[in-house]
Amino acid sequence: MLKFAISRIIAAIPTLFIVSVSVFFLIRLIPGDPASLMLGDLADAASLADLRSRLGLDQSIPVQFTIWLGNILSGDFGRSITSQQEVLPLILGRLRVSAEIVLIAVLLASVIAVPAGMIAAWRQNSLTDVALVSIATVLLSIPAFWMGLLLLLLFVLKLGWLPLVGYVSISQDFMQGLLYIILPVATLLLHEIGVIMRMARASTLEVMQLDYITHARAKGLSEAAVMWRHAFKNAFGPTWTLIGIVLGNLLGGIAVIETVFAIPGLGRLLVEAIFARDYPVIQGCLLMIATIYVLVNLVVDLLYPVFDPKVNAQ
Amino acid sequence: MKRIVLSAMMLGLLSPQAMAQTITASIAQDVRSTNPGVNRDDTTDGVVLHMVEGLVGYREDGSVGPLLAQSVDMSADGLTYTFKLRTGITFHNGETFSAENVLWNWTRYMDPATEWRCLAEFDGRNGLKVESVTAPDAQTIVMTINQPSAVFLDALARTDCGMAGILHYASVNEDGTWNQPIGTGPYKFGTWKRGEYFELEAFSDYVTPAGSAPDGYVGAKKPLAEKVRFYVISDPETIKAGLLSGTVDLAAVASTDVPEFAANPDFNVADSVDASKHTLSLQVADPLLSKVEMRQAIAAALDLPTLVTQVTNGSGRPNNSAIFPQSMYYSDVQKQAFAHDLDKARELLAKAGYKGEPITIIANKRPTTPSFETAVVAQAMLQAAGINATIEVMEWGTQLSRYFSGNYQMMAFSYSSRFDPALSFEQFSGPKDTTSGKVWNNPEALKLIDEGKAVSDPARRQAIFDELHTLLLHDVPMIIYSNGVNDIVSNKRLEGAVSWQSKLRLWEVAKQ
């Protein structure tokens, strides 16, 4: 297991390097210059030259890349062009906010959606199945930002139960934190329930048609035992992979939700940085997101044998 | 007894009056830094200038008035400015303000290490140079400049220069790096939760400048609330929800939301025109648009009052002048406008030899400017006159890059505020060989602009600016169609809430 983990981490290094090179050069292919964006139409030649020099943008791109890579390897992600904050603490601070929301939402979504998907498969074509599939389809079809606005309208404007903007970490103040993250978590939760439930249902249905399930039933096992011991363990693999992908996606990409609820998360930081051509922040965010993907997939792969006995980590 | 006192205290803490002492406003993006005139944008200036004041500031009509100065006198040769400072002013840390502070600040601003964005305006690179700054006594500052300039005080008052704000030494750390602003403004620095909110606290020892009401950045400036909190909310729907739920007391809203709030008895809606300019810029170096008849035809094809009504949902007013309507230089000549005349447009097109070549209008979809809407309406109007207009939509950063490189034919582009007319004309005028982003390169106009920057006599300046406007209407290097309009919605618990020049101005604003 340890050998597998180490080999996967080593294999991730070229991936991250390719990502960093691609990000560095691709972002510079986009027209637009951070210096002129910062100065706007007030820019005169002297101020523009000053700022470009201060930001190191007057150097050739290969030189900029060499400096940036050298700094990254020594743990220095640079400073934000717009806010002048150090990039790494900035990203980690924002990631903590996004991660709190995403992890809670995905955990709750999994706890609800996986059993619901299995029940739907177990009761295939029954009223329960139709109802669950319909709910999943509706939840999946509603764009997350729209769902967020509807929840905001109901719980903030109509009922006045929850605050509109702000963020307090639940690790600092559990009750206050809960009040602020209920709506963004609920928005993500509702959307992801649809995604996960459909996968759980489909993979369970596939497993339920296999011979060993018929064999288990023929042995006289109870339905609960069949579902839990034989169907769940074998059907959960693909769902687990999907949960990993969803987690990776959301950790780097809930900008819309963060914008609707005015939450200072990683996705919003990235979008704002792209508009401002804040190269160090864009590069740092994308590198962080790529790392998260690699790590999440690694964890998913390492835990796969726990759910699917046919797979081993060797 | 103790329990009764405690209960009373708790009730006091939680009473609506106590809560009401915080005015909440929304800003679309976070403050960039608290260092005035260094790392800034318009939102940043709006917040920072609650804490920091300069020697002079803008009045509502765009003229410059004394702020930390009591008076400003210019010598007969126009080279020496004497600032008499107000007495009894203290910084937020209780220290007394004097000429020594001004000297220290000026040295700091002129040090390239400070990275003051307006350094080039004063060190000679853009022509004007401050030769010396002295303090003959604790209440007097004397500045000498290298050439007579009508815009020297403007440059000092510019909000993007942080008003050359006077800070206490303790605003910077021992190594010279920035700490936090300790200024003389009506509000002082409170809490900054990046990405969430910026909170200011009332400065109880604030001494307001003379005046019974706010006048731009001068006039009465009393802090009437205990705290002011600026929430960072970028989504227009969330801003709307914030106002409706009472979380936000005032905010700038999209013009499409104005009718809804105007009909709601719980809210006041105030629209204010600022000095920013919405334009259709034409590339005079383009083979097709280099012909003046072609540009005049485009101007004649556009029904600008209708265009303004359409793109601003009725809140904008047409203005074809580079001077904003509240300016003391907004004369009858400046009110002269492009005339909508389709027959004349077709006649001019024929004279220009136009054969249906496509003309592309570049636009962006930023919510803060009506760029895309303008392009759509203009396209329809141009097509009605037989001009083959197309639209290319791009992201703002890309458009700005195209603007600076001069790589475009037409562009729906908005310019930020410039109060002095000479600076407003200069904003889009210059030789194209050295500044490809400049729109107007008529040598006669450039000469007039230079004269307008040097001459201080208001009558002479008026004549220059009127001549420039007439020339602009003839040359049509760009079509200025209106100034920016700010639609500010505030709940009725607020008294005195208005915006000025697209910045929320929260002194002299009280919350019931």
Image (spheres, grey):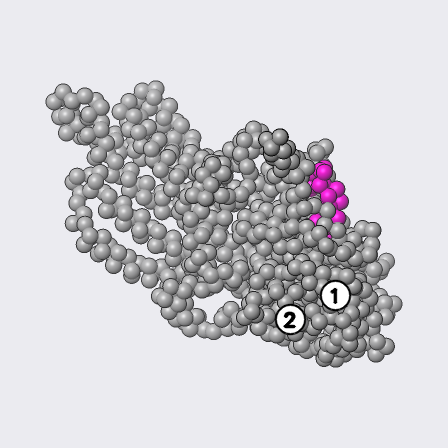
Identify the residue position indicated by label 2 in the image: B109
Chain to which mark 2 belongs: B
Q: Is residue A4 magenta?
A: no
The image quadrant that residue B8 belongs to is: top right
Chain to which mark 1 belongs: B
Residue B484 in picture, x, y percent from top left: 70, 52
* Residue plotted at (62% across, 30% down): B1
Identify the residue position indicated by label 1 in the image: B55
Q: Are marks 2 and 1 on the same chain?
A: yes
Residue B67 in picture, x, y percent from top left: 77, 61
User: Helix or strand or loop: what does disc 1 sit on?
Assistant: loop
The disc label shown at residue B427, or none: none
Q: Residues within 10 Å of mark 2 (few under 14, many from 20)?
A: many
**Amino acid identity at mark 2:** Tyr
* Residue plotted at (61% across, 50% down): B199
Nearer to us in this view, B284 or A177:
A177
* Residue plotted at (71% across, 52% down): B204
Residue B22 in picture, x, y percent from top left: 65, 43
Q: Magenta segment range?
A: B489-512
The image quadrant that residue B145 belongs to is: bottom right
